[in-house]
Structure formats: C-alpha cells, structure tokens
Amino acid sequence: MSGVPGIDTLLATEPADITPADRLTVARNVFVPLTTACRYTCEYCTFYDPPGEATLLSPDQVRELLERGARLGCTEALFTFGDDPDPRYDRIHAQLEEWGYESIHAYLRSVCEMALEVGLLPHANPGDQTRTEMATVAPVNASMGVMLETTADVRAHAGPRAKDPAQRIETIRTAGTLGVPFTTGILVGIGETPRDRAESLQAIARIHETYGHIQEVIVQPVTENDRWDRGTPSVETLRQTVAMARRALPETVAVQVPPNIAPIEALLACGVDDLGGVSPVTTDHINPDHAWPTIEDLSAEAAAAGVSLRERLPVHDRYLPADSRAGWFDGVPAPGNDWVSEPVLSVIDTERFRTEPWQTVAPSATDD
C-alpha cells in the first residue's frame, strides 16, 4: 500500500500542521546558461530566445565561467538550456556540428567533463530527455533535474509546441531507472488549481516511492516579467503549497524555495529546509530581474528565525558511498546506494570539499 498521502489530505494541510525544519541548506553555484534555444514557448518564460536570436556559449566562454566560479568558492556548476532545440534552430545545430558535436547532449557531456576538470560538480538541467540522452550525461553529473511544473494542462503551456506533463513525468521516471539523484518541482501561479498542485506533488512522491532518487522538490512561484503579466501567487498560497509539499514528501526529500523570488521569512515555518543554489558569480538567468541574496544575508535571515544554515553539495549525502566525505554535515548516506559515478566521486574526495560551513572552498584568487 502506498505511503503517499491522498489528495484530500494534502488539500486539507495547513502551515500550522507542519513542524518547521531546524536547519536550512544551500549550495554555492555558478550558473551556466548553455543555450537559450528551446522547443517550447511557455508564456511565463523569459529564458528562451526564438530561432535566429538564441545564443550558444562556446567552450572558451564556459571554461571562463567555470574557472571564475571555482575561484569564488563555488562547488556546483549548474548547466541549463531550453528543451532539446528543434530543427528551427538551424544556427545552433550548425555551430555544434562545426565544433564537432553531434547533438546538444554530446556538447553538454563535454562541458560537464570540463567542470569536473576545474573541480566543480556538475548539475545539469536540460529539460526532457530520452533514456539515451540522459545516459550520455548522467555519468559526469553529481545530480540532475527537471521541473515537473504541473501535471495539469494549462494555457501557459499551450500552443503549437505545447509542453506535455506526461513527457515530464517520463523524464523523472527515467532518472529513477538510471539511479540519478534528481531535483524536480512545481511552478505556482501558472493557471493551475490547488488540486492540480496536490496532484503534481502526489505524482512526484509516488515516483520517489518507486525509485528513491528525488533529493529535493522546489516550490517556485511564477513572477511577472516581460512575457507574463497575469500576476504572482500570494504569500498565503505559497505557504499552503509549501506545507502541502512537506506533507506529501518523506523527510529525506528536501522542500526547496528559491531565495531570490520567494518570501523566505514567511515560508520557513511551513516546512522549507533548503534554499537551492545561490551564485556569487552569475545572475539567475531564469529570473534575471531578481538578484541573488548573498550567503551572509541568508545566514543572517536563518539565524533570525532560529535555524542554522549549512552549505551542501549538489548531490545530497544519502546518495554517496558511506566512506566518501564523511562529515560534510549530519546527513546519513543510504547503505548500498552508491549511485554517483566515479568521475564525480574523484572530485568530491579531493581537499576542496572540507566540512567547515562557508569555508568549504577557499577562493584562490579575488575576482572583480
């Protein structure tokens, strides 16, 4: 019998029903927007560019970002791009071919290997993937991710290139069959109902119940921007959704909210225990109008709420072999779940990843 709460239970969950976390975690990353090409045209998204305008970072540009991130103490290289660029993006495909790559996923593997060479742990978020595509890049990633967003068919995903929730679900399942530590989440305020949110969280929880690979679930509000003028969710809506996420998921799965676009102080009591990645190097290319808070700001905010704030890696402790990096923080690795590949472990096991909070990586140089 499934241990996932039913829809009615989730819908009845209130913030007061949830025990607040006594510790927050955060990752320090460099955000690498590999390409702004995307086969979808979601109404709320400012990240994608149409054919003829989309960009593709060169290997030299990627290396410069990675090296700067390493100098500034990052541990994670977050690679993002729109879902697999379709044939309309002929310039992108021609450039990849000129550089010697048969696909965007072959290029993604190459830059993930570059990140490992620099000493950063890759976390790739390349949208929907087939099993073959994911198997190409998973061995050189500490973890991967894709936002489910919603299981509902919403207007914001409609049009000639509509995003299919079933395909998103299949990508998350594929990660489970491959044993990839995975991040997913829901978007709040894109036309879904409270029941839709409950069903989306329930779907994530059931997949995790089968595969055990989901390490964190993001509750992310949509924000108004140049393409979206239909409002943002209220604080009370976010509080209830975070509480519902905490009720839906086992304690081992973190509930995350983005600290640059969510009202952290209002959500800490609702079950939030992770703040995702914060970059001292780059802007949030998904939400460029919202600057990252500093680690110091987040630490102060956590202290004011009476909780500790600790740095983590992009792969959570329970997915690491029991003898790797003992003492990063108080996480307990699950026995037998040695899911992270040897190339990634070789970086984790170096001196760069010490256990002291906020001094995990000592910057080797000062950037402007």
Image: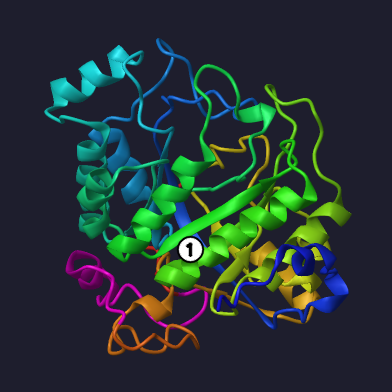
Closer to the camera, 315 or 10? 10
Task: State whether residue 70 appears in this view.
Answer: no
Residue 354 place in picture, x, y as percent: 38, 80
Residue at 31%, 66% (x, y): give it: 179
Residue 185 place in picture, x, y as percent: 58, 54
- Where is residue 25, by image quadrant? bottom right
Q: Which residues are magenta?
A: 337-359
Q: Quadrant of the N terminus?
A: bottom right
Q: Is residue 105 left or right of residue 305?
A: left
Residue at 78%, 77% (x, y): give it: 18
Label 1 residue SS = helix
Task: State whether residue 48 appears in this view.
Answer: yes
Q: Is-magenta flag for residue 72?
A: no
- Which residue of the protein is positioned furthest toward the top in this rendering? 52
Residue at 81%, 44% (x, y): give it: 233
Give the labeled residue for mark 1: 207
Q: Is residue 136 above or below residue 353?
A: above
- Amino acid at the residue labelled 1: Ile
